[in-house]
Image: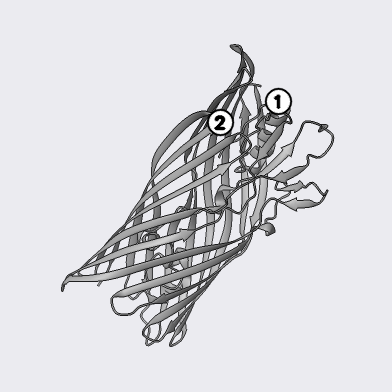
């Protein structure tokens, strides 16, 4: 999850391109014994969500057909029509990320812990003669960028030391509306204004025989803004189940800020735009008695990213390709309600999620490349699957106060030519919701 430069040509080119994209990070520029190779991972942080509410996350994110509370504003706005009382809610996230890698036999490790408020919401159901009409206002933070990274190693009498620290988040201010259009069908929409920031501090040093060959120190400070929305439908399949459909509209994003190259005494202005594609999802929920079973599938065609930056590459056949491809996400979850008395209930949850990484890791052979010639890439060996297990508890007190907690564990491994990286992530979410009688 970093960028580096074993050569001035490689490092400076990567720094400028990646700064302009404000979120694309290179995996590294790794040496080989015979030919030199650059390894590029054109990663956009806005492709992986951290989760905004404890109950959905405790069920592995399988919530498109469940949505019956304030979390529906984020997952399926049509589910807001199921809210029958005024509701206030908020969520706190405790995030822990650990990065460990092995570079030419040398292992390095870094970890970081941060706390974020990931949701604040208000839901108001209008009194109606029949059916339902509901509005909602909320602030949700689906993308948390905090990370600390360290890499060090020695090869062919040369040593390398790299440190990367970044922090930031991207949130959405949203308005939602839902209405029953038939006895068993609800429709809804969400309109969101995107707002966030990202700061990245990157230091790279290369030495030989105790003498410094190269040193770079860049600080990248970016403000992110934009807008997006969602359309949703929720159908009730008798008393035993529901089906949810969601279409997330493109995210139109603008990035502006500065890149300060401290080692060179230079500063660059960043003013870029990007459009991320549609996402479609379908979910089913079964409710036999006190048991709730849910499953979601979500399709995103990341090849439709609209950006004129370094997301496109020339392969070995001379064809122009995009480093991103379409992905299917899978979310599975279960919940069981234990009634502990007339005024108290306990919900126990578990879930699983598979969220594939949409980009490809690319290798560039630079041994015979000329600066004026476009680089030629080939794919690196790379397992894109990112799996997560989750567990959760929910406490219902007098049908007015709900306290939910979720714990999520995930890990991710990728390899380049001489570098193996492993990232472990743990998330704890606490959500409180109060409903007026």
Dot 2 alpha-carbon crowd within 10 angstroms: few under 14, some 14 to 19, many 20 or more: many
Q: Nearer the viewer, residue 434 or 234?
A: 234
The quadrant where residue 275 appears: bottom right
Task: Give the residue drawn at x 65%, y 43%.
Answer: 21
Image x and y of residue 377, in percent: 74, 43
Task: Give the residue drawn at x 34%, y 60%.
Answer: 89
The quadrant where residue 22 appears: top right
**Image quadrant occupied by the N terminus:** top right
Q: Earlier in the sequence, mark 1 or mark 2?
A: 1
Judged left or right of residue 364, residue 393 is left
Judged left or right of residue 50, residue 416 is right
Vertical relation: 332 (above or below) 222: below
Image x and y of residue 360, in percent: 65, 49
Dot 1 alpha-carbon crowd within 10 angstroms: few under 14, some 14 to 19, many 20 or more: some
Q: Nearer the viewer, residue 297 or 434?
A: 297
**Image quadrant occupied by the C terminus:** bottom left
| Of marks 1 and 2, the one in the foreground | 2
Q: State the colouring used for the structure image.
A: one colour
Which numbered disc covers residue 131? none
Q: Nearer the viewer, residue 243 or 390?
A: 390
**Tag count:** 2
Q: Can you identify the residue that label 1 sits on?
A: 8
Tell me the element at label 2: strand
What whole-number distance in Å separates the C-alpha atoms at marks 1 and 2?
Answer: 20 Å
Tell me the element at label 1: helix
The reply to whether dot 1 and dot 2 touch (C-beta < 8 Å) is no
Q: Can residue 310 be seen in this snapshot?
A: no
Image x and y of residue 40, in percent: 66, 40
Which numbered disc covers residue 103? 2
Task: Give the residue drawn at x 78%, y 39%.
Answer: 375
């Amino acid at each position: 999850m970093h960028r580096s430069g074993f050569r001035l040509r490689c490092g400076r080119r990567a720094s400028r391109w990646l700064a302009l994209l404000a979120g694309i990070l290179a995996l590294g520029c790794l040496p080989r014994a015979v030919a030199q190779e650059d390894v590029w991972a054109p990663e956009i942080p806005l492709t992986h969500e951290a989760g905004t509410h404890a109950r959905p996350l405790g069920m592995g994110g399988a919530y498109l057909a469940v949505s019956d509370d304030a979390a529906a504003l984020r997952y399926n706005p049509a589910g807001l029509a199921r809210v029958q009382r005024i509701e206030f809610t908020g969520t706190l996230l405790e995030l822990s990320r650990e990065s460990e890698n092995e570079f030419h036999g040398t292992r390095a490790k870094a970890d970081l812990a941060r706390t974020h408020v990931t949701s604040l919401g208000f839901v108001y159901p209008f009194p109606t003669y029949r059916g339902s009409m509901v509005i909602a206002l909320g602030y949700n933070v689906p993308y948390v960028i905090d990370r600390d990274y360290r890499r060090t190693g020695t090869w062919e009498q040369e040593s390398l030391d790299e440190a990367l620290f970044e922090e930031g988040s991207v949130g959405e201010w949203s308005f939602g509306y839902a209405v029953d259009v038939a006895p068993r069908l609800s429709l809804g929409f969400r309109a969101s204004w995107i707002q966030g920031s990202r700061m990245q501090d990157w230091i790279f040093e290369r030495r030989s025989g105790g003498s410094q060959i190269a040193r770079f120190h860049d600080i990248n400070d970016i403000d992110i803004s934009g807008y997006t929305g969602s359309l949703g439908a929720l159908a009730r399949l008798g008393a035993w189940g529901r089906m949810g459909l969601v279409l997330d509209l493109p995210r139109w994003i603008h990035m502006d800020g500065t890149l300060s190259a401290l080692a060179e005494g230079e500063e660059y202005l960043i003013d870029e735009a990007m459009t991320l594609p549609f996402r479609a999802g379908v979910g089913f929920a079964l409710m036999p008695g006190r048991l709730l079973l849910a499953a979601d599938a979500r399709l995103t065609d990341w090849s439709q990213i609209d950006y004129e930056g370094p997301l496109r590459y020339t392969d070995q056949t001379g064809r122009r390709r995009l480093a991103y491809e379409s992905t299917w996400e899978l979310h599975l979850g279960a919940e069981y309600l234990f009634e502990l008395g007339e005024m108290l209930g306990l919900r126990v949850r578990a879930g699983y999620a598979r969220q594939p990484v949409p980009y490809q890791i690319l290798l560039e052979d630079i041994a015979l490349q000329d600066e004026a010639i476009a680089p030629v890439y080939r794919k690196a060996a790379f397992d894109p699957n990112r799996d997560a297990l989750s567990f959760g508890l929910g406490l219902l007190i007098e049908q007015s106060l709900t306290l939910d907690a979720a714990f999520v564990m995930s890990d991710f491994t990728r390899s380049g030519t001489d570098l193996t990286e492993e990232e472990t992530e743990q998330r704890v979410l606490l959500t409180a919701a109060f409903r007026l009688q």
